[in-house]
Amino acid sequence: MVEQSDRAPLLDWEEIPPNELTQAVPAPAKENGSESNPPDGRSLGSTALAIGWNTSSGGPVSVTTIPSLNRSPHLDYPGPWGVPSPIHADSRISLKERLGWEEKDQIVAVFVVTFDTRSGNMVEWCLPQDVNLDGVEFKSMASGSHRIAKDFIYFRKGCYFGLACFANMPVESESERGARMKSVGILSPSYTLLYRYMHFLENQVRHQLQCPGSYSPLEAFYEDKKAVLPPAGNGLVTACPTSAWVPAINRCMHPEMKITHPAGCMSQFIHFFGEQIMVLWKFALLRKRILIFSPPPVGVVCYRVYCCCSLANISIPGIGVSVPEFRPFFYINVADIAALATEMSYVACTTEKIFEEKKELYDVYVDNQNVKTHRDSLQPLLRLNGVDREKYRKLSEQRQLLLYTQEVDGDCTSNEEDLFILFFMEQNNRIFQTLSEVAASADPTLTAEHVRAMGLDPQADRTFLVDLLELYGIDAMLVIDNPCCP
């Protein structure tokens, strides 16, 4: 079996036909109260979740029937809302067909960053010339990059998201100390489509290293892809009319669509963390501040940030409207300390070890595969229990079955990203469906049977459940006897 790459396929920004940019949207619920059955479409092979953490549904909590996961996977395994699993998903309906809308290119800036031996990192060139790029010279060239030949970096800059490609070329120049280092990057209001320009940015950073000062291709790119921002002046661009998604989609479904073309991103994540994914899942659902440390290259670590956000997807409208938004910050450095100090919930990655000492900035610190927390109240969540291991076993079974059907049957209509996202969304939906039913009942008492029905361990997951009830403001009482107490 061929191993998938950690890197996403690189697509040429000029050669993606608009009719291929498709994505599924759950159909609005029927007025008679019957369930909503969304079509199962893809955006370049993707499963749509939501349009980002700016989207909000509000409204009362509704209960969605979630199929049981307590069985071995098979070819027609149902997903949420009765949707066929990605293993046999074959219908294709685009956003444009469903809503008369298609996400547009929204590039708000393009820039070149260089390393100067006297001044350090600096913005060499940009369009538009009046755009505020303060700090982008450090976000687009990760600390420690001088030790590697190339990299790519996702990051946040205020209300925008960025993607930059870095390259390091040896040169026979004393003034440059034998190495020329540059990054070429872009900013957009959304990270959804940034991957489409990876190939272009990689080509351009090589071009800048070989022919410094030749910006014509970048100028043409910006003129072709630049966004028209709204007159409000807040820099925010609504990718899709919110009214079209309400109440069918909940704002707590993260992340918005994808950052990768069908990919190898989730495969690498599962292979890298193994059973520890279940620990990260609980922290993500509790909206903790998660910081991932790794030395360069940082591109694949940015994908881990995205995968962590995917663990917290919830598709039941109204659930989580009062909890902190689970924001992906992607790559951060010391210049982001002030911004992180105000965040209540995020996932980020860094190459700077000094962050480990800044314990006030994070709840969970991930050093390669080692997940740890300095908060005593969160220590019990670090321990895997039997139910956690059983969930991971089922995920592995479904993944192996998917890989088998791809290899034997040549079925390429689905991918691991779809399976991974749907698996955890089902887990989350099942938990909140049960909690909502109990809270709305005449006797809002959560018993051991309820906990088992949620796919949790009544004893080992007690701390997790207590924190979950408090965070999401669910009015239910947990009365499970603790065998450790008299």
Image: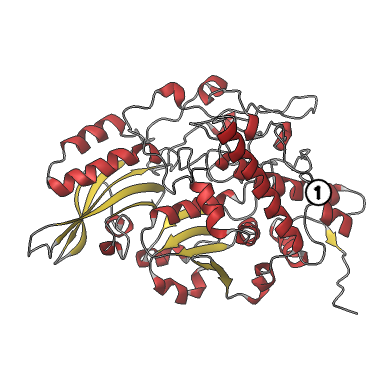
**SS class of the residue under badge 1?**
helix
Dot 1 corresponds to which residue? 434
Q: Nearer the viewer, residue 91 or 282?
A: 91
- Type of amino acid at the residue the image marks with label 1: Thr
| Image quadrant occupied by the C terminus | bottom right
On the image, the x and y values in percent for residue 471 come to 69, 59
Q: How many marks?
A: 1
Q: Nearer the viewer, residue 146 or 131?
A: 146
On the image, the x and y values in percent for residue 306 come to 50, 50
Q: Residue at x 64, y 26 (%)?
A: 39
Q: Residue at x 16, y 36 (%)?
A: 216
Q: Quadrant of residue 143?
A: bottom left
On the image, the x and y values in percent for residue 247 come to 66, 34
Q: Residue at x 69, y 65 (%)?
A: 384
Residue 7 seen: yes
Q: What is the crowding at mark 1: few (fewer than 14 residues within 10 Å), some, or many (at least 20)?
A: many
Q: How is the image coloured?
A: secondary structure
Q: Residue at x 41, y 67 (%)?
A: 337
Q: Is residue 467 left or right of residue 351?
A: right
Outermost residue, bottom direction? 486
On the image, the x and y values in percent for residue 38 come to 66, 28
Q: Nearer the viewer, residue 294 or 142?
A: 294
Q: Quadrant of residue 223?
A: top left
Rendered view: 261 above or below 174: above
Residue 128 seen: no
Q: Nearer the viewer, residue 443 or 453?
A: 453
Rendered view: 353 above or below 114: below
Q: Is residue 341 left or right of residue 164?
A: right
Rendered view: 398 above or below 289: above
Q: Is residue 345 left or right of residue 67?
A: left
